[in-house]
Image (spheres, helix red, strand yellow):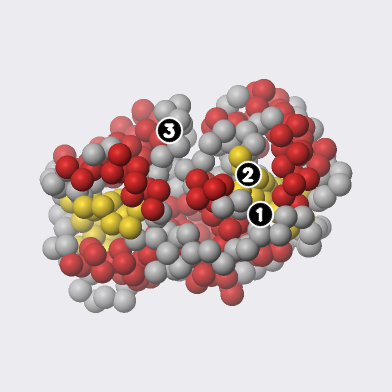
Amino acid sequence: MKIVTVIGARPQFIKAAAVSREINKYSDIEEIIVHTGQHFDSNMSDIFFKELHIPKPDYNLDINGLSHGAMTGQMLEKIEEVLQKEKPDWTLVYGDTNSTIAGALSASKLHIKTAHVEAGLRSFNMKMPEEINRILTDRISNLLFCPTDQAVENLKNEGFENFDFAKVIKSGDVMQDAAMFYENLAKEPEGIKNKKNFILSTIHRAENTDDPKRITEIFKTLNEIAKETPIILPLHPRTKKILKNLNIDTSNIEIIDPVGYLQMVWLLKNASLVMTDSGGLQKEAFFFKKPCITLRDETEWVELVENGFNKIVGANGEKIKEAYKEMKNKKLDFSKDLYGGGEASKKIVKELRGAL
Ligand code: UDP
């Protein structure tokens, strides 16, 4: 059986690392990896392949730094060429980036079956490029691997039970597989000043970075909180550019370059609280038993909010500070199984093997 895996962005490398490890247990599966190039810097791409032992990509499409339309268009053209040459049984795509929709669309037009890992998530915010990518990818996928009950429910509400070409499976979340596997390999990032009782923060979503009011308010508030509790913030290149252009004061925050996943796991293990607009980090806070404050207006991971592990505060300074006071000392019971307990990759590969 032949699988073409299409990945291109940081969270996809981590998810693919978990599934590829499982695929590699079977000598009858050949996995061809296509790296679209969406993320290409050494600390946003190479470090993940190296440290997580992801097989070297068979194809590097080197498509980056373009507008959404141009990027997706070029990916479609190049992925189509790869699929026509490789003729796989399955195309495997992850998450919600332009690489995801480009992989799924190229495959479906060639009548090659598509499996979508992390299917069914919805923020119900159509202004997010990620939401558009998710909805369209799900609609043309044949195997939809849902990380949560809510994701299964979302697809039901969109009528997926009536689509005879689509099979919806609750697999659990491959991010939990990764967190559990790499937990013991955590690496302290070089040269950090704060080693304990710090807040771990990341900010990179377009809805925050592309709105000068929101980004200014968020960083003003973080800079204030950092006077009381240290904040370590691995800075996404998109945010770095915007902070510089807007001349935003971050002097109290310990800003570091983006880190590899093993360093991120170390930061998660040693932090006392997480403040983020990342999707993945909200769950990782839970996996590493840390309360989380989400600097967005909504989340796809509603089960974390319903169970009190996560608080949604948007970009409102007062709300952020209130949530910080509430969450920093909150005692929570993290024993609940919300994401499948680290068995997702196994279920996904078993299903792919059985589906032929
Ligand atoms: N991550 C990382 N290094 C960083 C920032 C994030 O390894 O400097 C990891 C993080 O732990 C998570 C994934 O990248 O597993 C999430 O990526 P991101 O926040 O870019 O995307 P999202 O999850 O919001 O789609």
Q: Nearer the viewer, residue 218 or 97?
A: 218
- Other-residue count near label 1 (Cα within 10 Å), few / some / many at <14 / 14–19 / ≥20: many
Provide the residue designation for mark 1. Answer: 291
Quadrant of res 190: bottom right
Residue 303 drawn above or below residue 177: above
Q: Kindly identify which residue carries mark 2.
A: 311
Residue 257: where, in percent of width, then height? 66, 49
- Measure how far apart labels 1 and 3 are at the Cα level: 24 Å
Q: Where 59 falls versus 195 (above or below)?
A: above
Q: Residues within 10 Å of mark 2 (few under 14, many from 20)?
A: many
Secondary element at tag 1: loop
Element type where label 2 sits in the image: strand
| Residue hosting label 3 | 124
Position in image of residue 139 (x %, y %):
25, 39
Which residue sits at x=71%, y=59%?
Answer: 331
Q: Is residue 195 above or below residue 143?
A: below
The residue depicted at 57 percent of the width and 33 percent of the height is 297
Q: Amino acid at mark 2?
A: Lys
Indicate the secondary structure of the residue bearing disc 3: loop
Would the CB of label 2 be found within 8 Å of ligand 1?
Answer: no
* Gap between marks 2 and 3 measured at Cα: 18 Å
Q: Earlier in the sequence, mark 2 or mark 1?
A: 1
Alpha-carbon span between mark 2 and mark 1: 9 Å
In this rendering, the answer to whether 66 lies above or below 289 is above
Q: Residues within 10 Å of mark 3 (few under 14, many from 20)?
A: few
